[in-house]
């Protein structure tokens, strides 16, 4: 007799696959109409992988309910892949609510940074915090993201800016990866700012000669798994040449390049990323036409962060120009002490209204394309056989409600499932 399956999600009004032919990303017209099955079911095996997805009648003929450990009756509900958040800074101590007030009163991001606040404020508090305190805070934040539908999240270090604290942050991310159900892509961002009292050249040398070699040792020993390397490439932070050297060194260690570029000033970060074979570049509020062409050609994903432009009142990134040029557009929450947002449904809503993306484009950007930006499109980002059984069950008649109901996702997100396990049951939460 064949083995039981872990979970059957049956009779959903809509099952949004996103794509169905093993695409690693979607761009141009591919983002405009997503693959959807009306009245469908999904089966996830005990290995946590999708065994079957298709019309409800076909699935019920092949997988009787008795062959499944758990069954979710999704009648009148919608099923979507778990959301992927491609850019977050979730490990830190010391909130910056006071700076929010300063910014509302007119101070710019760089005014606050130059006055010793911003990243510097968070660095001071994160250096002083115990790893256990950071892990508690990270756990609460990741659980909040999960309850908003995120099942794969990128997590950066970058509030240490020296070896000891950067390693402490990466160890905290590693501990979360091992103990929580949410999937994590870990990013070393030791070049997030130039530490107080140092020059850019000194900070670059420290990253290249002290931090990266130690990281390499910890990775080889299996103590740490780090997936990506990041630099804040910006005027007054790390210039193009330092960024180039750091990213290249990370790439030589086997890390994926995924960095902050062209945010506050046009830096030609997009061209640099394309030249280095970066998997992704984030922000791009100030990207040039040449940068857009370079990214489209190199298949370097653009991770757009609608909360940044919203909170800092910056010009919006040119999402439409990037989409029309064929750039692989992904989305991230940019959760950090400057932008306290854990919700990808809100991020998608902002992307639609402020960046003029369609709802289909926003969902593709928050699933398959975000998975691509993290090098995980072969396992995540769509509901296809053999991929991870990570999905959302929404208590609504059309999937678009997840984006349309601004801030209403807590009400309609009924279940969050990771590898076939129900990790959030909204009804139970409501009763607590
Ligand atoms: N721009 C640089 N880094 C973050 C902000 C980090 C912070 O302000 O603490 C971002 O992506 O928005
Ligand atoms: Zn960031």
Image (tube, grey):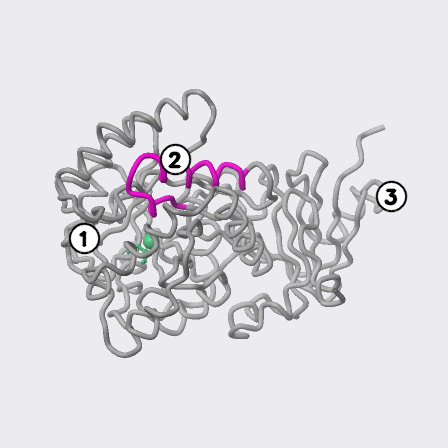
Residue at point 54%, 43% (across, down): 183
169 in the magenta segment: yes
Question: Which of the labelled discs sits on residue 167, or is there none?
Answer: 2
Q: Position of residue 350 (x, y in %)?
A: 41, 70
Ligand 1 neighbours mark 2 (CB distance < 8 Å): no
Give 48 or 320, whichever is nearer the viewer: 48
Q: Secondary structure at mark 1?
A: loop
- Left of 370 or right of it: where is 283? left
Question: Which of the labelled discs sits on residue 66, or is there none?
Answer: 3
Q: Position of residue 285 (x, y in %)?
A: 24, 62
215 in the magenta segment: no
Q: Position of residue 118 (x, y in %)?
A: 29, 60
Ligand 1 neighbours mark 1 (CB distance < 8 Å): yes
C-alpha separation, residue under disc 2 versus residue under disc 1: 24 Å
Which of label 2 and label 1 is nearer to you?
A: 2
Task: In the displayed orientation, state which residue is furthest to the front.
Answer: 128
**Rendered view: 122 above or below 403:** above
Question: Which of the labelled discs sits on residue 234, or is there none?
Answer: 1
Task: In the displayed orientation, state which residue is furthest to the bottom.
Answer: 105
C-alpha separation, residue under disc 3 versus residue under disc 1: 58 Å
Residue range highlighted in magenta:
156-177
Which quadrant would the C terminus be assigned to in this image?
bottom right
- Left of 280 or right of it: where is 342? right
Residue at point 29%, 42% (across, down): 161
């Amino acid at each position: 007799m064949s083995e039981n399956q872990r979970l059957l999600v049956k009779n959903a009004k809509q099952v949004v696959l996103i794509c169905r032919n093993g695409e690693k990303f979607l761009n141009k017209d591919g983002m405009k109409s997503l693959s959807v099955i009306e009245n469908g079911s999904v089966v996830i095996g005990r290995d946590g992988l999708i065994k079957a997805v298709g019309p409800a009648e076909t699935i019920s003929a092949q997988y009787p309910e008795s062959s499944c450990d758990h069954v979710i009756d999704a009648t009148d509900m919608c099923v979507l892949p778990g959301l992927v958040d491609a850019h977050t800074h979730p490990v830190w101590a010391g909130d910056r609510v006071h700076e929010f007030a300063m910014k509302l009163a007119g101070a710019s991001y760089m005014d606050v940074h130059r006055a010793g606040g911003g990243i510097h404020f968070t660095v001071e508090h994160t250096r002083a915090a115990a790893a256990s305190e950071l892990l508690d805070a990270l756990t609460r934040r990741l659980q909040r993201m999960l309850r908003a539908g995120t099942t794969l999240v990128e997590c950066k270090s970058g509030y240490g800016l020296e070896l000891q604290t950067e390693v402490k942050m990466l160890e905290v991310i590693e501990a979360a990866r091992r103990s929580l159900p949410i999937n994590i892509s870990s990013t070393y961002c030791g070049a997030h700012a130039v530490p107080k009292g140092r020059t850019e050249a000194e900070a670059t040398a420290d990253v290249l000669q002290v931090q990266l070699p130690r990281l390499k040792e910890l990775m080889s020993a299996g103590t740490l798994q780090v997936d990506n390397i990041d630099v804040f490439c910006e005027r007054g932070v790390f210039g193009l040449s330092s960024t180039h050297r750091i990213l290249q060194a990370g790439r030589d260690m086997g890390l994926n390049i995924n960095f902050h570029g062209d945010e506050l000033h046009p830096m030609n970060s997009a061209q640099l990323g394309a030249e280095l074979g970066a998997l992704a570049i984030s922000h791009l509020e100030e990207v040039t036409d040449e940068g857009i062409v370079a990214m489209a050609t190199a298949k370097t994903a653009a991770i757009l962060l609608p909360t940044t432009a919203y909170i800092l009142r910056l010009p919006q990134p040119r999402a439409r120009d990037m989409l029309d040029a064929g750039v692989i557009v992904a989305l991230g929450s940019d959760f950090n002490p400057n932008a306290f947002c854990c919700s990808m449904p809100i991020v998608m809503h902002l992307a639609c209204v402020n960046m003029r993306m369609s709802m289909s484009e926003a969902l593709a950007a928050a699933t398959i394309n975000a998975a691509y930006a993290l090098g995980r499109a072969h396992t995540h980002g769509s509901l296809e056989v053999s991929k991870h059984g990570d999905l959302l069950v929404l208590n609504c008649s059309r999937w678009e409600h997840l984006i349309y109901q601004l801030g209403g996702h807590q009400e309609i997100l009924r279940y969050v499932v990771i590898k076939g396990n129900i990790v959030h049951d909204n009804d139970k939460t409501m009763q607590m």
